[in-house]
Image (tube, rainbow, N blue to C red):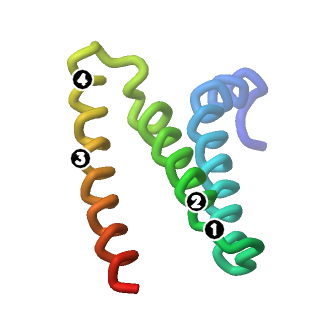
């Protein structure tokens, strides 16, 4: 129906990592949305930031395939995400200081 068993095996070999990555990101997103909706404890935002960090690490290491790149590319990818982290922290400080 969908090709020979060998063709399906080859397709799964190529699609396994992207499919598992997408499933992992969807699961982490569901955790974040569930925590945001339920607010089970006062400082739930800390857990949400950790989950968001796990999502960023998953995207950086798996989707962007930085782990297979030369050290200089890894350095600049890390610097870029560090800069985004600084901007996010500055926004968070502004948000929290306004009360």
Q: Secondary structure at mark 2?
A: helix
Q: Is residue 73 above or below residue 46?
A: above
Q: Earlier in the sequence, mark 4 or mark 3?
A: 4
Residue holding disc 2: 46
Q: What whole-number distance in Å separates the C-alpha atoms at marks 1 and 3?
A: 25 Å
Task: Please identify the quarter of the rendering in which residue 94 is found.
Answer: bottom left
Q: Earlier in the sequence, mark 1 or mark 3?
A: 1
As drawn, is 50 to the left or to the right of 78? right
Q: Secondary structure at mark 4?
A: helix
Task: Please identify the quarter of the rendering in which residue 31 is found.
Answer: bottom right
Residue holding disc 4: 73
Say whether marks 4 and 3 touch (CB < 8 Å): no
Residue holding disc 1: 43
As drawn, is 47 to the left or to the right of 41? left
Residue holding disc 3: 83
Q: Earlier in the sequence, mark 1 or mark 4?
A: 1
């Amino acid at each position: 129906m969908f090709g020979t068993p060998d063709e399906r095996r080859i397709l799964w070999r190529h699609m396994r990592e992207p499919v598992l990555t997408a499933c992992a990101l969807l699961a982490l997103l569901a955790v974040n949305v569930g925590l945001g909706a339920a607010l089970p404890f006062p400082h739930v935002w800390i857990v949400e930031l950790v989950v968001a960090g796990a999502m960023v690490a998953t995207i950086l290491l798996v989707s962007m395939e930085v782990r297979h790149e030369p050290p200089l590319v890894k350095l600049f990818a890390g610097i870029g995400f560090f800069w985004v982290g600084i901007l996010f922290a500055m926004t968070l400080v502004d948000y929290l200081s306004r009360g």
